[in-house]
Amino acid sequence: MGKLAITGGTPVRNKPFAPWPVYDAREATALQAVLESRNWGGYPFPNRHGEKFARRFAKFHGAKYGLPVANGTVAITVALRAAGIEPGDEVIVPAYTWEGTVTPVLEVNAVPVFVDVDPHTYCLDTTLVERAITRRTRAILPVHLAMNFADLDAIRRLARRYALRVIEDCAHAHGGQWKGKGAGATGDLGCFSFQSSKLMTAGEGGAVITNSLELFERAQSYANCGRASVTDRFRHRLIGFNYRMTEFQAAILEVQLQRLTSQAATRRRNMDYFEDRIRGVRGIGLLKRDPRVTGVAAYQYVFKYLADDLGGIPRAAFLGALSMEGIPCDGLFYEPVYKSTLFPVRANEYPALSWRRKRPLDLRKLYRCPVAERAAYEESVWLPHHIFLGSRRDVDDIAAAVIKVCENVGELRGLRHPAITLQQVSRADRARLEKRQY
């Protein structure tokens, strides 16, 4: 019998962490009010709760205009269309992100161009972006990932030099700030998700924010079946879709926004304490904190597992052992999109991949981004944000478990690991465990 729970020892933690999402009587009251109003949908547009929430959300991030939409992926689609991205245009995207960042580029019949990420932040590596720009490039779509922001200063310099649009994917960055300006307000448009796991949620939902009235009007029309914008100063007429948010979602989000600031402060305080506890632990690497990020919106806490420092024991074994100690965790949270099974892109379905080319682009074979691949398959460890909303004792348990596994990692050598068949370990990591012995 070993010290680790996975080898028969006593786990660090036996009780669950506080549940997510967080709600109280305010959400119940808001939902009941919408129910009784019988005014449930997003039409007439913008409906009462949708308009009020979007206005407050935009102001909270330092933007003039906000548009509520059905989900975060739709938000990016709307932003691309509002920004004037046309069939055949190229949009630069980070390789390491959720597939929903990239699929909207294909949906507007444009071409995603993958760029590797910075090994210190896992965000778009701006030193590589310029060499990816061609005469067809029309936009850069940076993702603010987990705890970090993409380098918006460098991205804006490139955008000005090459006359490109900047569309920020802020699905992880609610309430975050870059040099005192809210997430989504530095670029031309910012896109947010309110899916169940996000920092504020209505189960699903999204938002687009901008400081440009013209872009806002175009976005409104796209989201509201092509109807003229409420202000209609620029008189754009275009084909649109029904991407509206319901009043139920908007009413919940109005309340969720009220508690976002206090939750962010709790997360930051607990994550700073956790980071102090694990700093210097052999086998653990910390991501870089950029001082220009003046407001941290930590969607998850992410650190690096350094297998070479721990005798080559793979990350999947570490994750299985950490899970058995009672700590929710994930490794293959994201893949490089071009390798993901959720990205079965075929050129015959997206004509822009073939236009003006001798042979169609095969996005799944065209790219190799070594930092993104290392992060996805070997290195990154993701801890869910809600476990940092509890007490310092909760954080002590998280830190103690990480340290315990690292200090006793040798117990994992030689184990055959159908034993690690835990829901908390990703399916891909479980598959790797089942194929090897170490």
Image: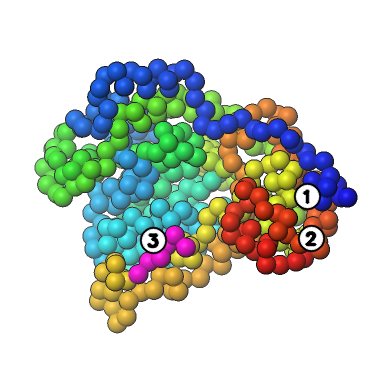
| Mark 2 or mark 1, earlier in chain | 1
Magenta: main secondary structure: loop
Residue sitting nearer the eye, 42 or 268: 42
Residue 244 in percent (x, y) is at 27, 38
Q: Is residue 24 visible?
A: yes
Mark number displayed over residue 92: 3
Mark 2 and mark 1: Cα distance apart in space? 10 Å
Q: In the image, what residue type sits under mark 1?
A: Ile
| Mark 1 or mark 3, earlier in chain | 1
Q: Residue at x 58, y 31 (%)?
A: 19
Mark 3 and mark 2: Cα distance apart in space? 43 Å
Q: Please tell me how crowded label 2 is: few (under 14), some (14-19), or many (20+) other residues with Cα within 10 Å.
A: some
Residue 294 in percent (x, y) is at 52, 37
Q: Please tell me how crowded label 3 is: few (under 14), some (14-19), or many (20+) other residues with Cα within 10 Å.
A: many
Q: Residue at x 25, y 22 (%)?
A: 38
Mark toward the viewer: 3 or 2: 2
Residue 251 in percent (x, y) is at 36, 25
Q: Are marks 2 and 1 in contact (CB under 8 Å)?
A: yes
Mark number displayed over residue 6: 1
